[in-house]
Image (cartoon, rainbow, N blue to C red):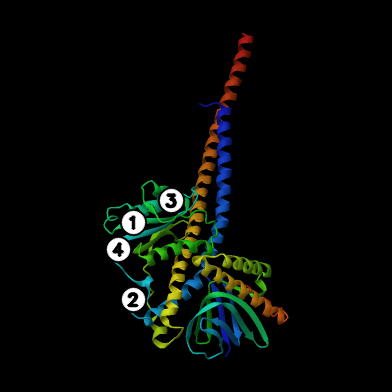
Amino acid sequence: MANTREIRRRIRSVENTAKITNAIQLVAASKMRRAQDRALQARPYAEKMQAVLGHLSGVAGDPDTAHPLLERREINETTVILITPDRGLCGGLIANLERHTGEIVLGPEAGGSGDISMIPVGRKGGDYFQRFGINFRASFQELGDYPGLAETQPISRIAIDDYTAGHVDQVLLVYASFVNTVTQTPVTVPILPVEPPPSDEESSGETQYIFEPSPQEVLADLLPRYVDLLVYQAVLEAAASEQSARMVAMRNATDAANDMIADLTLVYNKARQEQITSELLDITGGVEALKG
Amino acid sequence: MPLTLEIITGERRLLRQEDVDEVIAPGSLGELGILPHHAPLITSLVPGELRVKTGNDVEEFYIGGGFLEVHSDEVTVLADAAEHGGEIDAERAEAARQRALERLEQATDADRARAQAALARSLQRLRVLEHRRRRGGGGREMSRPTG
């Protein structure tokens, strides 16, 4: 049986760990709420833009020729934009993202559809895939807890430029989609070539829109912004996922630490009692011997 | 029946107002005014001033380009950036104008377009402020962003 001083030291150390994990949990919880709010606030714009794009795709002519960003080509090179957190301590989130991306980038089919390059956003994903010698077209770190459009636009602009210049023929976006507070699932979303949302039957059927200057020009203005928006939304959702994964992981850690403290306290009390009992036995034994 | 106007950016909903009489927006083919019963329209916008008339009241907004959709008396502005006249920081806009002018002088071709765009944005912001000042500022209180 370990002596009481050692047990006490161990309890204190676990208590300190629990304090830290509890603090991280509280911070993550408040950041999560804000990140979720921001993801919700971006929604009206996205919905409206999709609706407009839906109206347009019906009138702008053949999608393959209407605009370069719509054009589907034979796939010789794919770029994967991977959005991961900058920091760890968020449970299995990063490992899941890495495994999911690994299947696309390193898996058996990876070579089949041509070359692969990546644009890692967030330190963790970049660090991991660097080891495999994958070509990075760019890499981004430290976008902050609440990135704005101004921070995410450079990411989408690189993808758009590469696609327009013909360096890449397909751009995929991988991020942790926020299902609910305890579930975040890695998802792959193709962003280039742009897949226009199906045109809304009831409104496009009834309404003939006037387009100024022309459907093609509005489309040319809209498509890059649509890609910007897809990336922005993914980054927002990834931020909400990161914070909630961290909150849950840290809550589990705090619970585990508290369990451990309870167990150790029990062991400590037993050890202390044993010590007192044996001391008492010594004393009574001594008294008996003296009486002798 | 008055118009319903919504101004949305990627980051927030700046305004939703239901009793608007007229919207004057900086369309890419020139300024355009929208009155009730306008035909369905989708147009792109350039950086400029958006005016909202409600009764005798006029409110100015800065719009950093984007799109405008009119459909059954609902006007939706999808803006790259949008600020209420009262939100614009005069000093920042002036500083941006100076910076853009300096960069324009020494710019190479690639930077020239960006400097010009930055200059246009700062000039438009200042223009919105100037109009607001001439009108005597105020207007109604800025409606809180919702949603």
Mark 1 to mark 3 CA distance (whole Å): 15 Å
Q: Chain of mark 3?
A: A
Name which residue type carries label 2.
Thr
Circle 4 is placed at which residue position?
A75
Circle 2 is placed at which residue position?
A65
Q: Are marks 2 and 4 on the same chain?
A: yes
Tell me if mark 2 has few (under 14), some (14-19) or many (20+) residues whose alpha carbon lies within 10 angstroms of its own. Answer: few
| Quarter of the rendering containing residue A8 | top right
Mark 1 to mark 2 CA distance (whole Å): 26 Å
Name which residue type carries label 1.
Ile
| Quarter of the rendering containing residue A55 | bottom left
Circles 3 and 2: CB atoms closer than 8 Å: no
- Judge from the rendering whether residue B58 lies leftward or rightward of residue A185; answer left or right: right
Q: Chain of mark 2?
A: A
Instruction: Determine which of the numbered discs, if any, sits on residue A116 in the image.
Output: 1
Instruction: Determine which of the numbered discs, if any, sits on residue B95 in the image.
Output: none
Which type of secondary structure does the marked residue at label 3 adopt? helix
Circle 3 is placed at which residue position?
A126
Tell me if mark 1 has few (under 14), some (14-19) or many (20+) residues whose alpha carbon lies within 10 angstroms of its own. Answer: many
Tell me if mark 3 has few (under 14), some (14-19) or many (20+) residues whose alpha carbon lies within 10 angstroms of its own. Answer: many
Name which residue type carries label 4.
Ile
